[in-house]
Image (cartoon, rainbow, N blue to C red):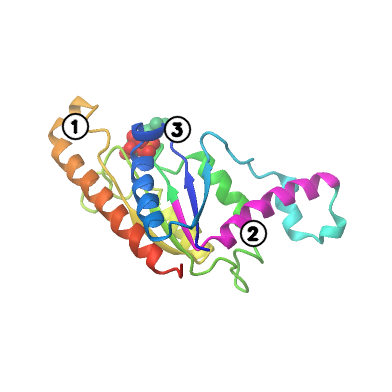
Amino acid sequence: MATLLHLDSSVFAGPASSSRTVTDAFRTAWLEQHPEGTVVYRDLAADPVPHITAEAHLAGFTDPVTHTPEQAAAFAARIALIEELEQADAILIGAPMYNFAIPSTLKAWLDNVILMGRTAGPESRSAEGTPVTVVASRGGSYAPGTPRAGMDHVQNFLEATLRDGLGLDLDFIVPELTMAPQNPAMAELVPLYEASRTKALEDAHRKGKETAARIAA
Ligand SMILES: Cc1cc2nc3c(=O)[nH]c(=O)nc-3n(C[C@H](O)[C@H](O)[C@H](O)COP(=O)(O)O)c2cc1C
């Protein structure tokens, strides 16, 4: 049965969140194609995974029979997250920009699932090729040619980790200028925000269906 792993990391709930609104549209479209499919959902803001610890990190480089009880417990929690990643046919991630980067809760999830010798590394990448769609919402614009181009540390970081590290088939949807309706200094940008939002929702609907079509029912 088709499985979608869906992660959200916005601190805002429901429709108050730009990224959640778009991940919801993608998920709905995906489920229309796979009504019997499974969605494994993690709200990383409401229910964060533990930050990586020395125990959990070092356990990845030593024989499990040598693990202390603390290492074994910490490593088992990592493996549970890794298995969710490996068992997914497609992955959907809401990754709003907070201070030019991804939310720390999403970084914590990545630190857990990137495991050399299993999900990452030259010899084996256990989730290689899985499609991942990232909804990278942001209050401003970091598009080429804009004053803040080059200050986006969301997309380049996720290219390095999800695409180059884990070998996932990475695609972005980028709702931008989302602060325009609230920020009087951005009033002139409201039409561009509205166009970006409309496009993001259309992209989510289309890509949700396209991603679903890549998986046998
Ligand atoms: C803590 C915090 C930091 C933010 N930092 C930035 C930033 O550096 N650049 C930016 O363009 N927008 C920034 N924003 C605005 C968000 O990127 C914007 O509201 C986006 O739509 C968030 O998506 P969400 O509604 O799904 O959380 C920040 C918002 C918060 C809450």
* Residue 168 coordinates in the image, percent (x, y): 48, 64
Q: Earlier in the sequence, mark 3 or mark 1?
A: 3
Q: Amino acid at mark 1?
A: Met
Q: Amino acid at mark 3?
A: Val
Q: Earlier in the sequence, mark 1 or mark 2?
A: 2
Is residue 108 visible to the viewer in this orientation of the structure?
yes
* Residue 58 coordinates in the image, percent (x, y): 74, 53
Q: Is residue 88 magenta?
A: yes
On residue 53, which mark appears?
none
* Residue 22 coordinates in the image, percent (x, y): 34, 45
User: For mark 2, what is the residue?
Assistant: 115
Which residue shows up at 38% across the image and 45% down it? Answer: 24
Magenta span covers which residues?
A: 69-92
Compare residues 65 and 42 and report the one nearer the observer.
42
Which residue shows up at 57% across the image and 47% down it? Answer: 109
User: For mark 1, what is the residue?
Assistant: 186
Q: CA distance from mark 3 to mark 1?
A: 22 Å
Mark 3 touches mark 1? (CB < 8 Å): no
Q: Earlier in the sequence, mark 3 or mark 2?
A: 3
SS majority, magenta: helix
Which residue shows up at 49% across the image and 59% down it? Answer: 162
User: For mark 3, what is the residue?
Assistant: 11
Q: Amino acid at mark 2?
A: Leu
The answer to whether the residue bearing label 3 lies less than 8 angstroms from the nearest atom of ligand 1 is yes
Quadrant of residue 66 within the rendered picture: bottom right
Compare residues 19 and 104 and report the one nearer the observer.
19
**Within 10 Å of the Cα at label 3, are there few (<14), some (14-19), or many (20+) other Cα atoms?**
some
Compare residues 181 and 84 and report the one nearer the observer.
84
Identify the secondary structure beneath mark 1. helix
Q: Is residue 134 magenta?
A: no
Quadrant of residue 64 within the rendered picture: bottom right
